[in-house]
Amino acid sequence: MIPQMKKEIKSAIITGIIIIAAIAGIAAYFTSLDQPEINENSNLLQPTSGNSSIPINENQYPLAPDLVGISGYINTTPDALEEAMKNKVVLYDFWTYSCINCLRTLPYLKEWNEKYADKGLLIIGIHSPEFDFEKDINNVEMAVQKYNITYPVVLDSDHDTWDAFGNRYWPAEYMTDYLGHIRHVHFGEGDYNITETTIQQLLEQRSQALGLNVNVNMSLVNLVPHEFSDQETPELYFGYDFATGRSFIGNQEGFQPDNTVTYSLPSSLQQDHFYLDGDWQNLPDSMKLASDTGKIVLPYYAKDVHIVAAGPNVAVQVLLDGNPVGTSDAGLDTQNSTVQVSENRLYNVISSQQAGAHTLTLIAKPGFQIYTFTFG
């Protein structure tokens, strides 16, 4: 009798655990319907059938957070932006002006703004800086003018809005319907057709809901996207705070925070590592040349090479595989094998016809300051 009772009690306990687990699972499922998780590159728009959208309940999608901690406004004012956002499909673009991936996305954003702004789309550029010099509104205004950005840009200099969205990437697009619910998320470059198709669908839903007679051109913007190489060298950082966990300095002297270090080139070089020659000041976000002359040598694999740099109008000589770079490989900012560095920004140093393995040498003068190498 006693063993049988123990068996019955054990079975009852197991059954109870199964029931509790099932109830918890059902509860979790319905909770997830109320608070859908936004994954990378997710499209939260429900599918369409023919030309009419399936009826949806927008409230099942999360509301976009408010713009908070904004330190400056370009192409708009706080009141004008608040008014412009009402009943609009809003595309929030997180970017920073020294980011090559962000800059390659700009042509699509500008085309979409031109094509859909009068149909109910509002693009807001949220400038969330990577480096301190990108917090200066004068620098951001210069970039907005240079790249002919006409839609509103707000300065998220302390990343308050970045944190409110839970964002982690440049560039990043968050798109809302006319009620402010997030319906599409995309991180990085690419998938432009998907993003534009979502714009069109959300504008159609807005038109129907508000009783508007808006005709949306359903063709897609036809631009040539950037082609990436499978072997492309990763982004390389010169600031000791940025290089943690991804240090690609090849000199045995390494990073020495806040010190001016005399570096010398080793006898052999490793691809995807940069090597310094001369006296360089180690800064949290960059390195600054302190000697009368200095070199940076980089064996890399890519088509395009960019640097984020600054300097007091410093002429930087560019060598490719030991020779002054020719016109066939010179970047947009390279003229006569020289890059004139004055503004704090991204400079296109090399632009070859195709990706390949090369060695880049930069020969600089005092005051030259470099933040990163980026590639394409």
Image (spheres, rainbow, N blue to C red):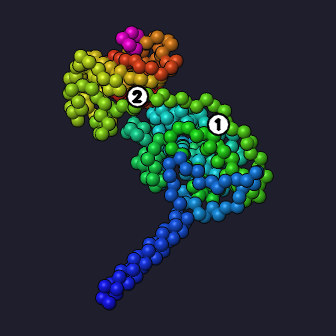
Segment colored magenta: 318-324
* CB contact under 8 Å: marks 2 and 1: no
Residue at 38% in and 18% down: 360
Q: Position of residue 124 (x, y in %)?
A: 57, 46
Q: Residues within 10 Å of mark 2 (few under 14, many from 20)?
A: many
Rendering quarter of residue 256 = top left
- Pointer 2 residue: 233
Q: Quadrant of the N terminus?
A: bottom left
Using residue 211 as the reference point, say whether residue 27 is left or right of it: left
Q: Callout 2: helix, strand or loop?
A: loop
Give yes or no for residue 56 being in the magenta stretch: no
Tell me how many marks there are: 2
Q: Identify which amino acid the numbered label 2 is placed on.
A: Thr
Q: State yes or no: residue 321 in magenta.
A: yes
Residue occupying the point 39% across, 9% down: 323
Query: Disc 1 designates what residue?
Result: 111
